[in-house]
Image: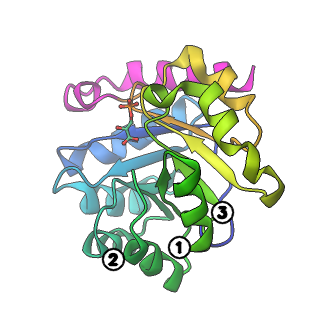
Amino acid sequence: MSDAPLKLPPVIPVAVVENAADAVPLAKALIAGGLPVVEVTFRTPAAADAIRAIRAEAPDALVLAGTVLTTDQAVQAIEAGAQGAVSPGTNPEVVTVFQERSVPFMPGVATPTEIERAIGLGCKRLKFFPAGVLGGPAALKGISAPFAHLGIEYCPTGGVAESDLAAYHAVPGVVAVGGSWIATRDDITSHRWDDITRKAASAVSAATG
Ligand code: 3PG
């Protein structure tokens, strides 16, 4: 992230929230499972309202904005109260918006060239995406090795399953692992809050061994 690093739990549930009214029960279900964090993606028009609702009504949860692709979305995320943000790629204009407002931001990278570019923009914590198809923990280990002395940190995301968590966390520099399996779009629209709590607890225990 581009500013002071946020303290992240070991797993980041990535959520697509269709209806902002689902955001607070979602955050509470994750908190009940011991995972007080949610990445609300800007893939639906409800994202900003969902972030705002969680900040107001479930303040124990850390709220990140995800899939922030434009400077407009970055501003909306910040105004809604997002405490950090994430993108699948690295858009320098989006990086600047977050840096100017001192909101931690993780741009996405997939290659050494992209890591160099993100470092050049002042980013020190990066989303490795889409981690699974890029080759999983072994790929991240190899791609990140030349940057280890710079203290770059990573959040691999994309195609991750609970059974992968330990291997990703064993890669130097990995601070958190993201994924949508803990609270799928269907879980959220069907209000399966107990299932989300159970999957959150299971993911925490898999990640922390
Ligand atoms: C993301 O935005 O980070 C991904 O959609 C999450 O990837 P997953 O759905 O494969 O977990």
Picture residue at 48% right of the left edge, 31% below the top: 134
Q: Which residues are magenta?
A: 184-209
Name the residue located 52 percent from the left edge and 56 percent from the top edge: 114
Which of the 4 image quadrants contains residue 184? top left
Mark 1 within 8 Å of ligand 1, using the beta carbon: no
Q: Assess mark 3: CB under 8 A from ligand 1?
A: no
Q: Earlier in the sequence, mark 2 or mark 1?
A: 2
In the rendered image, the vertical position of residue 73 relative to residue 57, given as above or below = below
Instruction: Quote the CA–CA distance across marks 3 and 1.
Output: 13 Å
The residue under the point 40% across, 55% down is: 89
Q: Which residue is labeled 3 in the image?
A: 124
Gap in angstroms between the C-alphas marked 2 and 1? 11 Å
The residue at 20%/31% (across/down) is 189
Q: If the image is split into quadrants, where does the N terminus sit?
A: bottom right
What's the magenta bit mostly, secondary-structure-wise? helix
Residue 40 versus residue 13 in the image, above or below: below
Element type at marker 1?
loop
Kindly identify the amino acid type of the residue bearing the numbered disc 2.
Val
Name the disc covering residue 75, or none: 2
Density class for disc 2 (Cα within 10 Å; few <14, some 14-19, many ≥20) is some
Query: What SS does tag 3 mark?
Result: loop
Q: Earlier in the sequence, mark 2 or mark 3?
A: 2
Q: Is residue 204 visible?
A: no
- For marks 3 and 1, give the one nearer the viewer: 3
- Between the C-alphas of marks 2 and 3, the distance is 21 Å
> Could you say which is closer to the camera, residue 140 or residue 173?
140
Residue 42: % across, % down: 27, 55
What residue did someone put label 1 on? 103
Secondary element under disc 2, as helix, strand or loop, is helix
Residue type beneath disc 3: Lys
Out of 181 and 79, give the one closest to the viewer: 181
Residue 130: image x %, image y %?
43, 36
